Amino acid sequence: MVKHIDSRKMGRGSHGWLESYHHFSFADYYNPRNIRFGVLRVVNDDTVQPQTGFDTHPHKDMEIVSYVVNGELTHQDSMGNQRTLSRGQVQYMSAGTGVTHSEYNLGGGELRFLQIWIFPDKKDYAPNYGDYRFAFEERLDRWLPIAASAENPRSAAPIRVHADINVCAAYISGEKPLALEVAKNRQAYLVLIEGLAGIQGSEGRLELSARDAAEITEENISIHARAAAHVLVLEMAKA
């Protein structure tokens, strides 16, 4: 089964310094039918104005992945980490027993990034942080493994999270479709970050625009770029 998630119907946050699309209930957007998707709790598509950002705040018992689309993301946390990442680079923070952090745009242009929260498989892990400066070309017309369960030794993903989930990205040039396998008892959440794409499933084809998403359950699909398509996929156990 494939379900289209239209970005025009998502929750929105508009704060002057921040424009956000909420894929799931978050902050002032609350929909009791749209709280989570499996272990996935938050996907926020955030655009942050220059010299602004998220002031220091706490988290606990959550796996957090940030994927930079454009601009510069500067992270600082209570573990002593301070890093700046750019397009296509990724940071990971396991909040565990508790951590505080800030996320700023200290650059001269807009920052756009995806903020992703994942429920851990248990509480009270030791806090942890890491970041990975993937070359953008690594995802050209192929899946780039980004994150996977710490219990999955077969994955090539460098980020290890405390959850049964696989995160990967691709930039599809349009020359040929890219296949995605979603096995029995598995499901996936696909975000079309940039571009235009069609998703071909067993019951036909869905057309997605930039910032749209799709829920895919126990079905193999192919992704066809109508204009170069930048895609992020989060694959997990079926809820």
Image: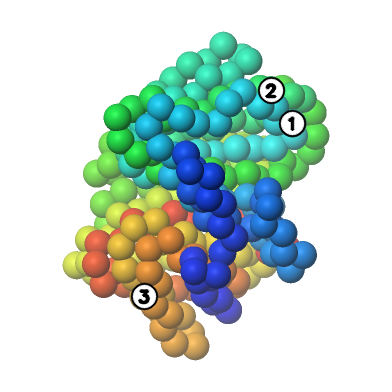
Q: Quadrant of residue 95?
A: top right
Where is residue 137 drawn, in percent x and y? 24, 44
Query: Which one is nearer the viewer's eye here, 216 or 9?
Result: 9
Residue at 56%, 11% in the rendered image = 80
Distance between mark 2 and mark 1 Cα atoms: 7 Å
Name the N-terminal-most of marks 3 and 1. Answer: 1
Name the N-terminal-most of marks 2 and 1. Answer: 1
**Label 2's element?**
strand
**Label 1's element?**
loop
Residue at 60%, 71% in the rendered image = 217
Badge 2 density bin: few <14, some 14–19, many ≥20, Cα 10 Å: many
Write down the residue under mark 1. Answer: 60
In the picture, measured across the screen, residue 96 lies left or right of residue 194, that is right
Contact check, label 2 and label 1, Cβ < 8 Å? yes
Distance between mark 3 and mark 1 Cα atoms: 38 Å
Identify which amino acid the numbered label 1 is placed on: Lys
Q: Quadrant of residue 186?
A: bottom right
Write down the residue under mark 2. Answer: 99
